[in-house]
Image (cartoon, rainbow, N blue to C red):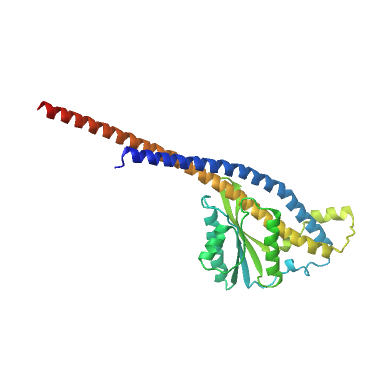
Amino acid sequence: MANVQDLKRRIRSVRNTRKITKAMELVASARLRRAQTRIEAMRPYADRMLELMGGVARASASVRSIPLLQRREVRTVAIVPLTGDRGLAGAFNGQVIRRALQLEREVRGEGKEVRWLVAGKKGRSTLTFRRYDVVGAWTGFSDRPQYGDAQAIAHRLTELFVEGEVDAVRLVYNEYESPLVQRVTVKEVLPIAEHLLETDEEERRDDAMRGDFIFEPEPEEILSRLVPVYLETEVYRALLESAASEQGARMTAMRNASKNAGELIDGLTLQMNRARQAAITQELLEVVAGADALQG
């Protein structure tokens, strides 16, 4: 059984750890609020981008000539897990990596090849440890991604797709629902789905009521410029969702760690009190025994 001094040291150590976990919880909470604000600010832009693409696509004679819209036989799939640069976030990184590896098995089971790209130090280290060939890796921005980070990823994906090195690109990331819930999502971003450019009968009727538009340059050229920007927007949205999920997972993990530390402190305090009482009792017995020996 540990003595009183050992228990005191353990209690002091756990208390110091609890201070750290509480501080990390507060930091994650503040960053989560900022991440939520960025997601909410970005959604109207993404929706407007879709509307603009749809309007230009309706005016285009054909969209088949745009490389990022071309669909071909899928022989090679690029899998892009979006992970964090740091740990201490519960199952945030683990569940993305597990889903990406499961997706790899599914793709290979269909007789297709897999190319790996990854964002985040945790994902890169896992794939490197497993000796996968990673053709693209980006780190250092998982908690606060910028639009330029999304552009770098989107440009590399576009390059691989246009050059025919991959025929489809799938992102694997945590979609933010709440601080307690982060849902792993697999999203195919290339080729861009044609149904995103389709509109219903009501929208087409509204366009007819507004009249004809004059496009300069031609609608096909405008659309060819909009499509890469749309890809960047989708990658940026996924990075923001992943960042918010990471902070939510870390906040929840640190809260649970602080709670567990408190319970551990209570248990150690109880053990220390029992050890102290046992020591006092032992001293009393020794004093009584010594007194009896002197009297005898």
Give how far across and how far down residue 280 sits, in percent. 26, 31
Identified at 81% across, 57% down, the residue is: 55
Q: Nearer the viewer, residue 258 or 43?
A: 258
The image shows residue 232, relative to residue 285, as above or below, that is below
Q: Nearer the viewer, residue 126 or 158?
A: 126
Residue 198 lies left or right of residue 8; in this view the side is right
Residue 102 lies left or right of residue 72; in this view the side is left
Identified at 33% across, 34% down, the residue is: 273
Would residue 101 be visible to someone looking at this image? no
The image shows residue 240, relative to residue 9, as above or below, that is below
Residue 198 lies left or right of residue 20; in this view the side is right
For the image shown, how many numbered marks are present on the structure?
0
Quadrant for residue 154, please give it.
bottom right
Give how far across and how far down residue 56 sits, in percent. 82, 60
Give how far across and how far down residue 284 sits, in percent. 22, 29
Give how far across and how far down residue 224 sits, in percent. 79, 64
Residue 251 lies left or right of residue 211; in this view the side is left
The residue lying furthest to the left in this view is: 296
Quadrant for residue 69, please give it.
bottom right
Q: Nearer the viewer, residue 32 or 271?
A: 271
Would residue 86 be visible to someone looking at this image? yes
Q: Quadrant of the N terminus?
A: top left
The residue lying furthest to the top in this view is: 295
Q: Quadrant of the C terminus?
A: top left
Quadrant for residue 24, please give it.
top right
